[in-house]
Amino acid sequence: MKRTYLGSAALGLAVACLVAGSVAPARAQGDWEITPQSEQALARGLQWLARNQGPEGNWQSNDLGLVGTGMLAFMAAGHLPGRGRYGDNVQRAMDYILRNADAPAGARRGPARISGKPFGLLNISEPRRGMYNHGLSTFALGQLYGMSNDPRLGPVLDRALKIICQTQCDDGGWDYIAQRQQHGHDLSLAVMQALALRSAVDSGLEVPPETVELAIKSVREHYTPQGCDRNAPEEEQKKHPGRFTYSKGGGNATTAMAAAGVVCLQEFAQYDDWRIEKNIKILLEEIDKHRPEQLARERRAPFDAYTLWYVAQALYQVGGDPWHTGYPKLRDCVAASQVQEPGSERDGVWNAQGHVSGRPGELYQTAVCCFVLAIPNRYLPILQEGRIDSLRARYGVKEKR
């Protein structure tokens, strides 16, 4: 099947129509979603991000994905270029990403490459971070495109989406390096691209159905049942517990991967997939292990930034009881774990955890924590339920339970 993309002019028209006709965000449903403590923590976190962004707009990081995450924290709270207290911060982060989009003049179509890299790759760090940074940056820019009318975003996103489709491996996954291979590397790469592709649909951009269909197949292959063979019929697997894992062989069964698998299926509109419920149960059990008072003493968020990013989105996208029961607990843990030192430069930060350290790690952790606390505002297109209608229509999926 031939892959088709909207041209830049058509992209602008589609998004302009979408934004003009979009439904206003459904704000928080009460103090079970937002509390005075969570609002104060969000405000302090955004202040820290604004103070530490720097003149380049990148928080001393050359990982475009991390810069995009910082930008998303402000956007999730309703700030956009020319709008809101932190509009200038969003503008500077966006400008940094666009300045570093690897797309020289004249390289607008096709899979041409410079120095082994596809034109338009959103990565200026080392190649092994290529598709991480590219997927996360594409997601962030796609959300911004759905909320603004900046004409510079269309061509960048057009090229970025082509790269995601062109580098999809034969088995439906992706590799760290931006190149098509026979086998994708792991689920952590697939979920980055899933968010980017879903963001494109939310913002009115075209995504080839075969890319999504192959990705869905790959994600399901990362599910490992416990108590029966992973190649057993689905009806047998349903009888046993199981979870999504980092690799297809069942290795590295982390909380992050349980959440990532749920997010992938939700973003691809596979709402009734039986694997989702089994992994949501795991996430709720992991959240219950944490107590706000202990995290406040340790100044440690309940999860590292990467895990927290997907746990929160998994709960929100599934909705219903998991969101209603799990989010308030997660929210209170996040708010309590923030550094509170009025008058100090560290006031409002969340300490870095996981594989990213230093100032980039503080950016990552703080931006994700702010994003989590801002989810109930529902400003981002990906958080607005009306935007999934196009996915339902395209892939013939059932209504969300």
Image (spheres, helix red, strand yellow):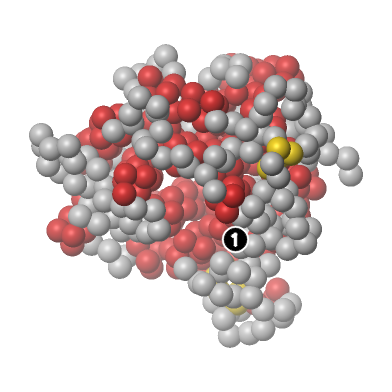
Identity of the residue furthest to the right in this view? 1
Q: Position of residue 8 (x, y in %)?
A: 72, 21
Task: Say which residue appears at 22% left-offset and 52% top-offset.
Answer: 337
Identity of the residue furthest to the front in this view? 115
Q: Position of residue 29 (x, y in %)?
A: 36, 37
Number of numbered labels in the structure image: 1
Q: Position of residue 176 (x, y in %)?
A: 61, 55
Please, is residue 397 above or below residue 225 in the view? above
Which element is circle 1 on? Answer: helix
Residue 329 appears in the picture as rendered: no
Task: Say which residue appears at 46% left-offset and 39% top-offset.
Answer: 62
Task: Say which residue appears at 63% left-offset and 67% top-offset.
Answer: 222
Image position of 225 (left or right of 182):
left
Instruction: For label 1, count other residues whose C-alpha is less than 10 Å away and answer few (under 14), some (14-19) or many (20+).
Output: many
- Locate the N terminus by quadrant: top right
- Give the quadrant of residue 26: top left
Nearer the observer, 125 or 86 = 125
Image position of 249 (left or right of 343):
right
- Give the quadrant of residue 295: bottom left
Please, is residue 346 above or below residue 6 in the view? below
Task: Say which residue appears at 80% left-offset and 34% top-offset.
Answer: 110
Residue 4 appears in the picture as rendered: yes
The amino acid on which the numbered mark 1 sits, given as a three-letter code, is Leu
Q: Position of residue 84 (x, y in %)?
A: 35, 19
Nearer the observer, 56 or 22 = 56
Residue that label 1 marks: 187
